[in-house]
Image (cartoon, grey):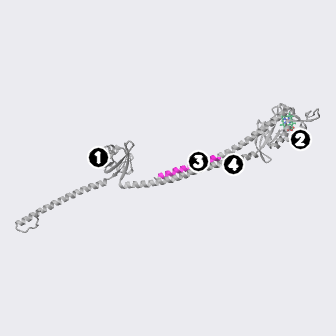
Amino acid sequence: MKSKIKQTIIDSTTSKRLILILGFAGTMAIAISLAWNIKLDKNNIIEAIRVQARSAYEKDIVYRRWNASHGGVYVPPTEQTPPNPYLDFIPDRDVITTEGQHLTLMNPAYMNCQVFKLGDEAYGIRSHITSLKPIRPENAADPWETEALKAFENGAEEISSIEQLDGKDYLRLMKPLITEKQCLKCHEKQGYKVGDIRGGISVSIPMDVQWKIMNTHRKTLILIHFLLLLVGGGSLYVGFLYIKNSEKKHIHTLKELYESNSFLKESHNITHLGTYALDITTGFWTSSEILDEIFGINSEFVRNVEGWLEIVHPDEREDMQNYFRQYVLTEHKQFDRKYRILRIRDQKERWVHGLGKLSFDELGNPIRMIGTIQDITERKRASIKLKTKIAQLKRLNKNMIGRELKMIEMKKEVDELCEKAGLPRRYNITDE
Ligand code: HEC
């Protein structure tokens, strides 16, 4: 019983531990999911900006290619667009139309620089054409660009990362500019050949707007995960309370059961009352400890009908067998007999009183018999002793009455003799 309570406590401790583990695992899973989602969102945003930077670069390239395919284009020189000093090796850098219009040659890089300025003013997207060997000093590469250009020399096709420019986050992306045939017109003199890396264009897109969007996403993600945690944790807590409560109830019931059980056992002990349950269909029965004690059997004893008949005193065996078959099994009456047994343990003769009640299936066939067997040896012995004592007493009594009669007879004779001798009657006994 104690061990059953212990088992219950162990069981529920296991469940409690399981809940704890579940809670821990759940919290971990939610934390991992949150971290994962935050990272994924950031990656997605960066990837989207990268795509934007790439397409800005592609467009620059297309403009350049158009310009380069014409070997440069002529535009009217202005204050912002003075004739390019780095083109002075070209004889017709500056031309005058037949109408007297002055025109100056604009090479792709020069055009790029101007377009980039417009883009920066309009969209905040910074672009820069650069080289490790710049012709124009303003085109010199910054440290990040230098690294990228070196990487291109080693075969890289694109470099991008989040970098700080003037204290603000930018996504920087850079791709190389490869020397093509039409570039040689102006760049051959620097020693470039087709396929050489002439330089590159870097595109830098500010991330502040993106970071703002990302923060909003992040707040939503945190809220959702917090709710998840709340719901998960809440249900686990409810489960925990439920287990605790049912454990309490279970132990209470077990204790009650234990108390009533031990009470029953105690009373059976006092009255030498054993109990059994017989499965009629199999012929096997189970027995209480006290019944085992009465029959003098141990756990190895085969508890079936034959086993029972083996316990019954040989003189009564046949009779009991018939009684059980006929009276109980056939006529469905209650088993109620006092009979002798030979206790298995020591082969001592004992008296028992057996009672048994049948239960039936829905077709009315007996399936079970439960009942009690009481050791009545002491009672029986007492009653046998009583019988002999009474018989003795009766015998004694009878003897005493005989003596009394004899005395009366003798007294009568004395009286008669007195009369014959002429003396007064001594006892004066008369026949009535
Ligand atoms: C019409 C002449 C001309 C043509 C054609 C030309 N470039 Fe240039 N390029 C120049 C000049 C001049 C500069 C110097 C910087 C400037 O003008 O702003 C320059 C600058 C550059 C720069 C910037 C780095 C630096 O040295 O200042 C790169 C990169 C570049 N060119 C690549 C190319 C490529 C690639 C081609 C072919 C697709 C090409 N150029 C075609 C004239 C030309």
Q: Earlier in the sequence, mark 4 or mark 1?
A: 4
Q: Residue furthest top?
A: 181
| Amino acid, disc 2 | Gln
Image-based side of 255 in relation to 302, left or right: right
> How far across and down, in percent of the image, does residue 289 sit?
39, 50
Q: Amino acid at mark 4?
A: Lys
Which one is closest to the eye, mark 4 or mark 1? 4
Which residue is at the front of the view, 155 or 217? Answer: 217
Q: Which comes before the other along the chain, label 3 or label 1?
A: 3
Give 140 or 229, whichever is nearer the viewer. Answer: 229
Q: Which mark is residue 219?
A: 4
Callout 4: CB less than 8 Å from ligand 1: no
Main secondary structure found in the magenta portion = helix
> In whole angstroms, how far apart are the C-alphas of marks 4 and 1?
91 Å
The secondary structure type at the circle numbered 2 is loop
Q: In the rendered structure, find residue 97 and report the number of the disc placed on it.
A: none
Residue 178, compared with residue 39, is above or below; it is above
Gap between marks 1 and 2, in whole Å? 135 Å
The image shows residue 378 at horizontal and vertical percentages of 31, 54
> Can residue 142 be seen in this snapshot?
no
Question: How dense is the environment of label 4, judged by Cα within 10 Å: few (below 14), some, or many (20 and up)?
Answer: few
Amino acid carrying label 3: it is Leu
Cα gap from disc 3 to disc 2, whole angstroms: 70 Å
SS of the residue under disc 4: helix
Q: Position of residue 65 (x, y in %)?
A: 82, 33
Name the residue that disc number 2 marks.
80
Magenta residue span: 3-31
Task: Report if residue 14 lies within the magenta region.
Answer: yes
Circle number at residue 316 = 1
User: Compared to 50, does 288 lie above or below?
Assistant: below
